[in-house]
């Protein structure tokens, strides 16, 4: 195989591994923003909390992050539900900007509380798996930990998609998304379901946070970039589409990886945003989106 | 209605004015500290704070300075240069500190040089490595740490005496620190006759540097020089292994590559082996007080100090000595005391300022057997360097 | 200047005079710097108010214009453009920049608009960081607009002047046809378009005026602190801060941005000196409380309270409306 081709394929594969985690983050926001129409600027902050939960388990109780991430997810589900009931629900029907302000405030509080509790110090989570020689086949190599994260993320992506499409709760959720006035008449407890889906979206961020932990360093403002990235993913995939967000995540991961390989890694984030602006101005329904709801 | 509001605003204004001037405690000597307690560099601000805390306790336990207790007055610059500038004014104009220490980052330090000079107050810079902080040649500015040019010079000197390689690749983080080190190395390496075959920038927050490292690998350099912060070191070395990058020398501009955890299983572990780094200071550095500082730090904060903490510690110690030598708190006298200071030894090595720059010895260390060893300069070395670094395939 | 008749114009001049005389009573440069920041951000809030308040377009990317103002000034000056001209030119560049950005982002609505303003500002920040020509992450030294002697006094007075001009622009907007069109767009863009308002055009004009003022503020700020890096004058935090100041005080009101800047920045400085690291927490909590309790901002909230007691003159009504609630 010629060199340029192997390089390209390698970059794509690396991008897919990261992309699976992006997909998980994006699907969480797709539930909250795409389906529930809550503009959540605290998504990255919740992801950060997920990372800290998993890190504390690792640091204090030697729980492997590949188990700890489940607890992160559960913790954030409960936490997300409480935050929804206390702070989001009261402003549920207010303008987008009030939601943006509120979630920005929540993000600030989360980041600063974590900094006060754990300090601003950088932490890393080294497990045996991350430092092992990579899994290699032919001319290609893949990081084992990233590969494991990819597989786990895949399971949750498919699981969430099936849940939203098939379960009664998922159907109720989509019913509310389609018509919030009629849904209660169909016997749907709107408040409960909305709280539930907000919590579910946050839990996805928590799971992704746990899975990202071995690959990233941890510090209180680690989540900042992920808030914007999550919105980019949702827009790429087409508003309101859970499946679209999954694909959007993979696309974003590959875009970053290819940008790094050919343009330089420092441009990856800028290319994310340029892609976002292009999609918004040229094809606002998203690359794969159906008509916007 | 509107008049009432205007009245409210005026009341608020006067409230601000009333609250702000605060009387300073009598009988203490107040030293101002500007550092980043919040914001993106808060981790380092914390190291500063810890280092200062140990120093001040030691100083006051010995009876303070000139028979008075020393008091630290912190100003959080929120990791922003403009806030650091405001800090100078707050500490000097309002709190009337006798001298200043700080800031943390090169950006923030660069920003305060002008106001420090116009306020005519002595400043000791503990950690700013970018050399543009010393451009002003202000007589009020003293830097205790070595700069990026010293890093490059020491590394090149070491290489020249150890096999004189021909090609070098520079990989650096997109920060002031990274860019300053890249520029210093690029200029000096070219001048020293090394061919710079690759210059690669990366974004620290993104965890995947493999594309960058693959491009470096294509150029097959003898030396790789990393100008990177903190924990990137672990990821860079792991991914160097993954892409099978095999230069003869892995060298670096300190920070992550000189952090206590880096060679241990909590850091890069075995991947750290054979990497060279410049270092301003190590707990094992051959200077009296180094080990004691490390032990005290570990006792208080349950982790080993990075050299940033030591630099903060030594800045305050130096300030105390200068005030003692000046026999008073007059700014010009303290400045002259700093100018004439000649500390034969300290926990941070000898301290003597030449045009404001401390002639700090930069060490070159190599990780061998999971520990840092000094390999250069020869008179401070405790082991011989291992060159070339074994290929990844040959490492067990 | 229909908005400023009779006592109002005297009140405005009076307040401005009081502000302008403040340095005579301030104990030192530090307090002057704090006031400089407060007045400057009041000006920035007023500039933002044109877009975010009257037109109801919630930009979180205003730091782009601020940064262009600061960087443009430093870079033009480095290329031998006279100092004050470089301030003016960079503000004009920012205005042109706003025309380009606006023509793209104003096709979008709601959160998409907000997100794309952030994206533009971020692309700018990342580009400046990556391009050595703009100083990269190392930053640029900026020229001082005023001599050292009266340095902060002059900067403070310039900020007061900028705030005064911004206030006049706001006052004019609140009572002009232009302003009514903007408010119509805010209340219901489709209806506004249906009755023949060229919505894109008016939004763009508001943004360009806003960008011009914001860039002047950026130039002042960059020069006052003498050294700029992307993370200071292009940081997204500044966008958020400008918006929050205005929302806290009351978006779409004349006095809102001023009240917001005074409260938020004075509080932030006091908290910082008192609580060290924990001061950021107070900021987040303040935002949450405002959203929950005072969604119209302080001035908006007070106005509502006031209007409930006495019947307001009809012409004040549009001022009390906020983008949050639609018309009332």
Image (cartoon, coloured by chain):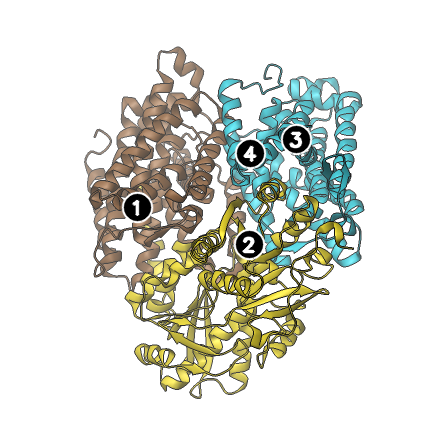
Chain colours: A cyan, B yellow, C brown
User: Foreground mark, 3 or 1?
Assistant: 3
**Are the residues under badges 4 and 3 in a single subunit?**
yes
**Are the residues under badges 3 and 1 in a single subunit?**
no
Q: To which residue does mark 4 refer? A: A262
Q: Residue at x 47, y 27 (%)?
A: C113
User: Foreground mark, 2 or 3?
Assistant: 2
Q: To which residue does mark 1 refer? A: C74
Q: CA distance from mark 1 to mark 2?
A: 32 Å
x, y percentage for residue A249?
65, 30
Quarter in which the C terminus of chain C is drawn: top left
Q: Compared with residue B340, is residue A25 higher up or lower down, i.e. above or below? A: above
The label number, if any, that marks residue C145 in the structure image: none
Q: To which residue does mark 2 refer? A: B225
Q: CA distance from mark 2 to mark 3?
A: 27 Å
Provide the chain ID for the residue under circle 2.
B
**Are the residues under badges 4 and 2 in a single subunit?**
no
Q: CA distance from mark 3 to mark 1?
A: 41 Å
Q: Residue at x 38, y 58 (%)?
A: B132
Q: Residue at x 76, y 58 (%)?
A: A60
x, y percentage for residue B118?
28, 65
Q: Specify whether A100 is left or right of B396.
A: left
User: In the depicted view, which residue is nearer to us: C156 or B139?
Assistant: B139
User: Foreground mark, 1 or 4?
Assistant: 4
Provide the chain ID for the residue under circle 3.
A
x, y percentage for residue A222?
60, 47
Judged from the image, the secondary structure of the residue bearing numbered disc 3 is helix
Picture quarter containing residue C91?
Answer: top left
Q: To which residue does mark 3 refer? A: A12
User: In the depicted view, which residue is nearer to us: C22 or C147?
Assistant: C147
């Amino acid at each position: 195989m010629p060199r340029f081709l192997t390089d390209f394929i390698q970059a794509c594969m690396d991008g897919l591994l990261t992309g699976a985690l992006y997909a998980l983050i994006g699907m969480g926001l797709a539930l909250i923003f795409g389906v529930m129409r809550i503009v959540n600027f605290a998504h990255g902050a919740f992801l950060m909390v997920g990372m800290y939960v998993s890190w504390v388990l690792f640091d204090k109780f030697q729980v492997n992050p590949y188990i700890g991430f489940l607890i992160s997810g559960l913790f954030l589900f409960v936490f997300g539900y409480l935050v929804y009931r206390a702070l989001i629900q009261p402003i549920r029907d207010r303008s987008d900007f009030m939601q943006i302000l509120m979630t920005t405030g929540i993000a600030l509080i989360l980041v600063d509380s974590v900094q006060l509790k754990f300090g601003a110090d950088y932490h890393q989570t080294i497990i045996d798996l991350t430092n092992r020689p990579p899994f290699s086949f032919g001319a290609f190599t893949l990081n084992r930990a990233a590969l494991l994260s990819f597989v786990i993320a895949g399971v949750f992506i498919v699981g969430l998609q099936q849940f939203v499409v098939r379960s009664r709760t998922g159907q109720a959720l989509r019913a509310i998304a389609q018509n919030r006035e009629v849904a209660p008449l169909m016997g749907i407890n709107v408040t409960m379901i909305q709280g539930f889906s907000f919590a579910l979206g946050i839990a996805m961020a928590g799971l992704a946070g746990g899975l990202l932990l071995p690959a990233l360093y941890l510090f209180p403002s680690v989540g900042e970039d992920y808030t914007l990235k999550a919105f980019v993913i949702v827009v790429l995939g087409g508003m309101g589409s859970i499946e679209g967000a999954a694909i959007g995540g993979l696309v974003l991961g590959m875009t970053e990886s290819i940008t790094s390989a050919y343009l330089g890694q420092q441009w990856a984030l800028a290319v994310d945003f340029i892609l976002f602006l292009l999609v918004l101005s040229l094809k606002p329904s998203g690359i794969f989106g159906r008509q916007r709801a | 209605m509107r008049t009432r509001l205007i009245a409210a605003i005026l009341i608020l204004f006067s409230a601000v004015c009333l609250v702000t001037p605060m009387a300073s405690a009598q009988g203490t000597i107040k030293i101002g500290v500007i550092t980043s307690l919040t914001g993106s560099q808060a981790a380092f601000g914390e190291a500063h704070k810890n280092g200062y805390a140990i120093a001040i306790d030691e100083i006051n336990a010995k009876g303070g300075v000139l028979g008075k207790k020393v008091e630290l007055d912190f100003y959080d610059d929120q990791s922003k240069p403009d806030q650091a500038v405001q800090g100078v004014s707050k500490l000097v104009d309002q709190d009337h500190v006798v001298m200043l220490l700080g800031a943390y980052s090169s950006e923030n330090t660069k920003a305060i040089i002008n106001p420090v000079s116009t306020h005519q107050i002595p400043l000791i810079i503990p950690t700013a490595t970018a050399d543009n902080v010393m451009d002003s040649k202000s007589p009020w500015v003293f830097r205790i740490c070595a700069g990026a040019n010293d890093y490059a010079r020491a590394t090149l000197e070491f290489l020249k005496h150890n096999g004189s390689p021909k090609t070098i690749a520079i990989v650096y983080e997109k920060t002031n620190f990274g860019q300053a080190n890249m520029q210093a190395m690029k200029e000096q390496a070219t001048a020293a006759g090394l061919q710079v075959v690759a210059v690669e920038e990366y974004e620290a927050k993104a965890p995947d540097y493999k594309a960058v490292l693959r491009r470096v690998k294509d150029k097959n350099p003898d030396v790789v020089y990393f100008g990177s912060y903190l924990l990137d070191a672990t990821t860079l070395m792991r991914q160097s292994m993954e892409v099978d990058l095999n230069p003869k020398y892995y060298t670096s501009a300190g920070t992550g590559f000189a952090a206590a955890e880096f060679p241990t299983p909590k850091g890069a572990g075995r991947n750290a082996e054979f990497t060279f780094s410049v270092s301003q200071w190590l707990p094992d550095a051959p200077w009296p007080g180094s080990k004691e500082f490390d032990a005290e730090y570990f006792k208080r904060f349950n982790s080993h100090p990075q050299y940033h903490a030591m630099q903060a510690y030594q800045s305050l110690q130096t300030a105390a000595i200068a005030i003692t030598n000046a026999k008073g708190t007059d700014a010009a006298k303290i400045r002259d005391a700093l100018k004439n200071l000649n500390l034969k030894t300290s926990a941070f090595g000898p301290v003597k300022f030449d045009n404001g720059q401390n002639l700090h010895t930069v060490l070159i260390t190599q990780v061998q057997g999971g520990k840092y060893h000094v390999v250069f300069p020869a008179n401070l070395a405790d082991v011989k360097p291992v060159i070339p670094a074994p290929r990844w395939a040959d490492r067990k | 200047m229909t908005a400023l008749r009779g006592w109002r114009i005297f009140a405005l001049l009076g307040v401005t005079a009081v502000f302008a005389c403040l340095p005579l009573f301030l104990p030192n440069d530090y307090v002057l710097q704090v006031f400089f920041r407060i007045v400057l951000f009041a000006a920035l809030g007023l500039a933002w108010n044109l877009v975010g308040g009257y037109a109801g377009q919630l930009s979180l990317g205003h730091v782009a214009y601020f940064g262009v103002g600061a960087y443009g000034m430093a870079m033009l000056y480095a290329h031998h453009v006279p100092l004050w001209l470089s301030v003016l030119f960079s503000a004009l560049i920012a205005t042109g920049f706003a025309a380009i950005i606006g023509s793209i982002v104003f096709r979008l609505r709601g959160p998409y608009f907000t997100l794309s303003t952030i994206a533009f500002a971020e692309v700018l920040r990342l580009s400046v960081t990556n391009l050595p020509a703009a100083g990269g992450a190392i930053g640029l030294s900026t020229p001082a607009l005023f001599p050292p002697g009266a340095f902060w006094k002059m900067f403070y007075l310039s900020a007061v002047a900028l705030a005064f001009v911004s206030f006049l622009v706001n006052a004019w907007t609140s009572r002009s046809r232009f302003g009514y069109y903007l408010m119509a767009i805010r209340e219901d863009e489709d209806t506004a378009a249906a009755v023949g308002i060229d919505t894109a055009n008016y939004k763009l004009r508001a943004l360009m005026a806003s960008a011009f003022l914001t860039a002047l503020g950026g130039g002042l700020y960059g020069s006052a602190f003498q050294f700029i890096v992307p993370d200071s004058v292009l940081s997204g935090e500044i966008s958020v801060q400008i918006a929050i100041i205005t929302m806290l005080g009351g978006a779409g009101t004349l006095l809102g941005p001023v009240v917001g800047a005074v409260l938020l920045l004075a509080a932030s400085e006091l908290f910082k000196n008192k609580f060290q690291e924990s001061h950021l927490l107070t900021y987040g909590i303040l935002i949450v409380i405002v959203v929950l309790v005072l969604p119209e901002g302080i001035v908006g909230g007070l106005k509502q309270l006031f209007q409930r007691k006495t019947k307001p003159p009809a012409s004040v009504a549009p001022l009390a409306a906020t983008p949050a609630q639609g018309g009332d």
